[in-house]
């Protein structure tokens, strides 16, 4: 009997400990990150295949650049074939999941929404070509490749789950922690995707500037999660391709913790499927990301990418007009080539390690080559489309102006004419024969106000009639030495004695509102920063500037401000146009040598694991300052397919463990407390902005100093930046700020020729106010029009200047949804579509063709 009791107690002891061990089970996401452009040695495919065979309990999640597989197939076809066999099982029992199919692993938050879509669509297409069985279930990344609008993009591509963790590569940032094991990650449009957040207890690692404590499923981490009520804790590291260790945490045993390798697909579907989820409406400010903003190399990369992004989507729209109205061949191969190099230039390594590589072949050098290729293709397609559309038999001196945005536009355009065209006694008429006022400038150019329909064009013709007299904008020098710039919208005062700052901006049609805070110690449009080797803080107001009049109306006025800051010459070209709410500023700084700007890092003091970093603190960088006469200011800022109202008291931080989202993608908008008045600031590149309760709005112009990994980020030439300002009434959406930014990004395109298109004016697509035409593409003869809503969520009418068999709502993965009713009018068709605010819809017009 005692023996039986002994065995009974022994059995109970074993059972108890089995339960205890089971309760201490954790899960682990292992796998590989990188690729042929980042890092992927030729032996890596064989290594992965062999290690999977050697370790039957090992499962991997991969984010490998899709182009990698072209080379892998070529250099080691046997390993490639073995890996394909292992990959083929995409069931829940499968051992490999492709978790980031993006073509070039972009950070996402720093590029356009349309670029994000192309990153995924081109990447998934190439992966499918190598692995036809591939199923894209979960989005996950080793880097902070996140942005708030991902839920609707991912779900439209067919993803079911996402991870907001990047525990082992946080150099560029991390996401805000959130309580609980799972969340419904809700995007700005209301779309939700089930996600694994960075847990509240997933702290940033000590003595590190790149890890959270979830990187290796330590006992400390797992016990903290269990104590916090997380039933199925999970950690993660996607190893760099080229690491030779195999399973990253070995057999997964850490003390009494047993970690089980899993795919994300299996974890969400089998392990945590019944676990509680909280709703989390993620803001862009929950993406706690940062780069060496203001450094010249990062600045120039961002400018080149932005220019190509804008140019390529405009090119597609112009090519669509040529296909519909002139039956031109859709240039798919050329567009694919242009997108490929643009997507590569958005690779996260271009932005975070721009200097890596051999001299002449760094990431920064590659961006120059890649975007240059994209731009040349765009120019070729635009010229070919224009020539194809020009089918008129009547010869003359014609200017066809194209509008690639979804709204009608009436704005001033400058057109350079052939030197053979005499500008002496010249006039201009529109397609209806009506005379158009113009302004003649230097270099054989004319300026006139073009009125162009949405996604369309209008033809103008030069005549020998004298131009209509045009009254309007003018510049004058005042008795006190200041300069007054005046249009129908603004009266602006420039003060040469104080570095050419803008002393006053009065919006004449906004109750003569003064937008400059004249009581602030900082000047409006002042340049100010800490030149740490040259006496500390220096400002453009420290010395007088010279102001010259470049153009004096009546349609456009320009002044040139010549000044100095810390011994360096700079110029600012300030432009205003009649009827144009935007104030354009082009800045050029001609640096002498490589001055230190920002916060200094003393020699020998930089250590990678120290959280304090000089490049984080924008207060010391060279800023363009904009003190605004707006009380109790609020800040709105755009992001890919999103706008966030900032909750930050200020944008300042100086440590890796205290990152704030101070990113300006295209624009920030500052309003007073009740959104009565505001001022939007636009920039030609992704960078950072500055703002605080006692600190005026500022745009990051320059940083020169210590960056990541102890690398000096210096100055090697002039700094050239374009930025713009729009004073307005009402909140950003009521004021049409997103659309204003699109107009700035996609300027009117003028093609000068001796022929013109068959129609003198036409429109291919028209959308209601607040809607944006994100892209137009073709699949055979089917036209795909992608529409983004920044306004209200009511059902609205979208009009097309073509015929179609039917209209169908289509997912980003090509799956067709609801058919939309079409109404036919004279030379138009239209449909009603309901899109929530910040929502995105793709309308397929089947067999689209001209009337």
Image (tube, helix red, strand yellow):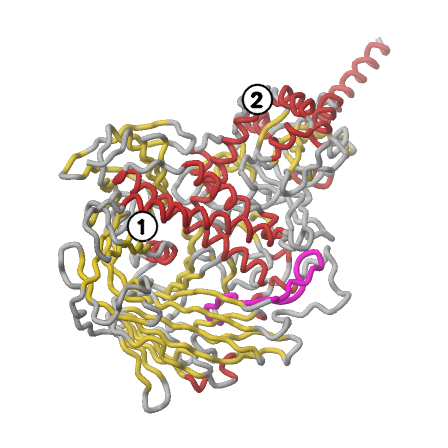
The residue segment tinted magenta is 694-716
Query: Is 208 situated left or right of 367 in this image?
Result: right
Spatial CA span between label 2 and label 1: 42 Å
- Relative to 806, say whether 4 is above or below: above
The structure residue drawn at horizontal position 64% and vertical position 79%, both measured from the top left corner, is 534
Relative horizontal placement of residue 827, taking residue 134 as reference (left or right) = left
Residue 16 seen by the camera: no
Residue 185 pos. (x, y %): 48, 39
Q: Quadrant of residue 180?
A: top right
Question: How many neighbours does mark 1 have within 10 angstroms: few (below 14), some (14-19), or many (20 or more)?
Answer: many
Question: What number is the disc on residue 725?
Answer: none
Q: Position of residue 851 (x, y in %)?
A: 19, 36
Q: Examine the rendering and report whether any part of residue 301 can be seen.
A: yes
Residue 284: horizontal and vertical position, in percent? 48, 50
Upstream in the sequence, badge 2 or badge 1? 2
- Residue 42's image quarter? top right
Q: Nearer the viewer, residue 282 or 468?
A: 468
Numbered label attached to residue 405:
1
Q: Is residue 219 above or below residue 463?
A: above
User: Most extreme residue toward the front, as rendered?
Assistant: 420
Based on the picture, tell me whether residue 707 belongs to the magenta stretch: yes
Residue drawn at x 66%, y 33% is 31
Secondary structure found at label 1: loop
Q: Position of residue 246 (x, y in %)?
A: 75, 31
Q: Quadrant of the N terminus?
A: top right
Q: Residue 729 or 41: which is nearer the viewer?
A: 41
According to the picture, the residue beneath numbered tag 2 turns out to be 90
Label 2, residues with CA under 10 Å away: few <14, some 14-19, many ≥20: some
Q: Residue at x 73, y 38 (%)?
A: 218
Compared to 621, does 750 lie above or below? above
In the rendered structure, the answer to whether residue 539 lies left or right of residue 682 reads right
């Amino acid at each position: 009997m005692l023996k039986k009791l002994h065995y009974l107690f022994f059995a109970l002891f074993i059972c108890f400990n089995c339960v205890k061990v089971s309760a201490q089970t954790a899960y682990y996401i292992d796998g590989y990150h990188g690729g042929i452009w980042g890092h992927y040695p030729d032996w890596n495919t064989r290594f992965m295949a062999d290690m999977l065979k050697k370790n039957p309990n090992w499962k991997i999640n991969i984010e490998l650049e899709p182009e990698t597989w072209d080379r892998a197939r070529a250099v080691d076809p046997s390993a490639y074939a073995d890996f394909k066999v292992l990959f083929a099982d995409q069931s829940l029992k499968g051992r490999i999941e492709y978790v980031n199919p993006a073509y070039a692993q972009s950070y996402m938050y720093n590029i356009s929404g349309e670029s994000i879509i192309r990153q995924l669509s081109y990447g998934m297409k190439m992966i499918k070509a190598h692995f036809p069985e591939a199923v894209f279930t979960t989005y996950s990344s080793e880097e902070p490749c996140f942005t708030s609008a991902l839920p609707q993009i991912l779900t439209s591509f067919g993803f079911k789950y996402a991870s907001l963790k990047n525990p082992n590569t946080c150099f560029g940032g991390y996401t805000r922690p959130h309580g609980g094991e799972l969340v419904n990650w809700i995007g700005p449009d209301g779309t939700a995707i089930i996600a694994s957040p960075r847990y509240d207890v997933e702290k940033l690692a000590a003595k590190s500037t790149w890890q959270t404590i979830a990187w290796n499923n330590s006992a400390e981490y797992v016990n903290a999660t269990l104590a916090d009520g997380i039933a199925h804790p999970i950690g993660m590291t996607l190893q760099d391709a080229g690491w030779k260790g195999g399973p990253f945490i070995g057999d997964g045993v850490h003390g009494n913790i047993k970690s089980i390798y899993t795919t994300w697909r299996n974890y969400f579907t089998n392990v945590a499927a019944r676990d509680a989820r909280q709703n989390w409406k993620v803001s862009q400010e929950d993406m706690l990301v940062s780069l060496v903003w203001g450094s010249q190399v990062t600045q120039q990369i961002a400018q080149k990418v932005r220019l190509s992004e804008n140019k390529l989507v405009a090119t597609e729209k112009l090519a669509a007009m040529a296909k519909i109205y002139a039956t031109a061949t859709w240039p798919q191969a050329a567009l694919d080539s242009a997108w490929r190099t643009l997507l590569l230039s958005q690779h996260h390594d271009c932005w975070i390690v721009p200097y890596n590589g051999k001299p002449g072949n760094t990431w920064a050098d590659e961006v120059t080559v890649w975007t240059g290729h994209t731009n040349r293709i765009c120019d070729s397609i635009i010229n070919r489309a224009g020539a194809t559309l020009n089918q008129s038999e009547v010869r003359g001196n014609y200017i066809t102006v194209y509008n690639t945005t979804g709204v009608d536009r009436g704005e001033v355009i400058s057109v350079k004419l052939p030197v053979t065209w005499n500008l002496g006694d010249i006039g201009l008429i529109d397609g209806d024969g009506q005379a158009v006022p113009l302004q003649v400038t230097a270099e054989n150019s004319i300026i006139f106000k073009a009125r162009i329909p949405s996604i369309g064009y209008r033809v103008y013709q030069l005549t020998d009639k004298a131009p209509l007299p045009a009254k309007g904008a003018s510049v004058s020098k005042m008795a006190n030495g200041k300069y007054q710039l005046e249009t129908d919208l603004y009266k602006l005062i420039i003060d040469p004695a104080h570095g050419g700052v803008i002393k006053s901006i009065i919006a004449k049609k906004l109750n003569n509102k003064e937008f400059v805070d004249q009581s602030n110690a900082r000047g409006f449009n002042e340049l100010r920063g800490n030149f740490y080797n040259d006496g500390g803080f220096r400002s453009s107001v420290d010395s007088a500037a010279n102001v010259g009049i470049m153009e004096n109306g009546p349609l456009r006025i320009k002044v040139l401000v010549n000044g100095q800051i810390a011994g360096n010459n700079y110029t600012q070209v300030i432009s205003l146009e009649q009827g144009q709410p935007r104030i354009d500023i082009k800045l050029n700084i001609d640096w002498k040598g490589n001055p230190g700007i920002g916060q200094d890092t003393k020699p020998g003091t930089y250590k990678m694991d120290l959280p304090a970093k000089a490049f984080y603190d924008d207060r010391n960088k060279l800023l363009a300052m904009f003190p605004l006469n707006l009380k109790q200011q609020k800040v709105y800022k755009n992001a890919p397919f999103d706008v966030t109202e900032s909750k930050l008291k200020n944008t300042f931080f100086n440590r890796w463990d205290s990152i704030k989202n101070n990113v300006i993608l295209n624009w920030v908008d500052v309003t007073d407390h009740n959104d009565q008045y505001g001022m939007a600031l636009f920039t030609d590149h992704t960078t950072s902005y500055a703002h605080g309760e006692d600190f005026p709005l500022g745009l990051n112009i320059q940083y020169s100093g210590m960056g990541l990994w102890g690398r000096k980020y210096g100055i090697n030439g002039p700094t050239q930046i374009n930025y713009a300002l729009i004073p307005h009434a009402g909140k950003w959406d009521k004021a049409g700020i997103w659309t204003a930014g699109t107009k700035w990004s996609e300027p009117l395109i003028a093609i000068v020729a001796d022929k013109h298109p068959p129609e003198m004016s036409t429109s291919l697509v028209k959308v209601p106010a607040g809607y944006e035409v994100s892209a137009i593409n073709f699949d055979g003869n089917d036209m795909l029009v992608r529409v983004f809503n920044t306004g209200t969520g009511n059902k609205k009418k979208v009009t097309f200047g073509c015929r179609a068999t039917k209209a169908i709502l289509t997912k980003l993965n090509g799956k067709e949804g609801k058919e939309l009713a079409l109404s036919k009018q004279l030379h138009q068709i239209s449909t009603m579509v309901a899109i929530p605010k910040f929502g995105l819809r793709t309308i397929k017009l089947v067999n689209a063709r001209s009337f």
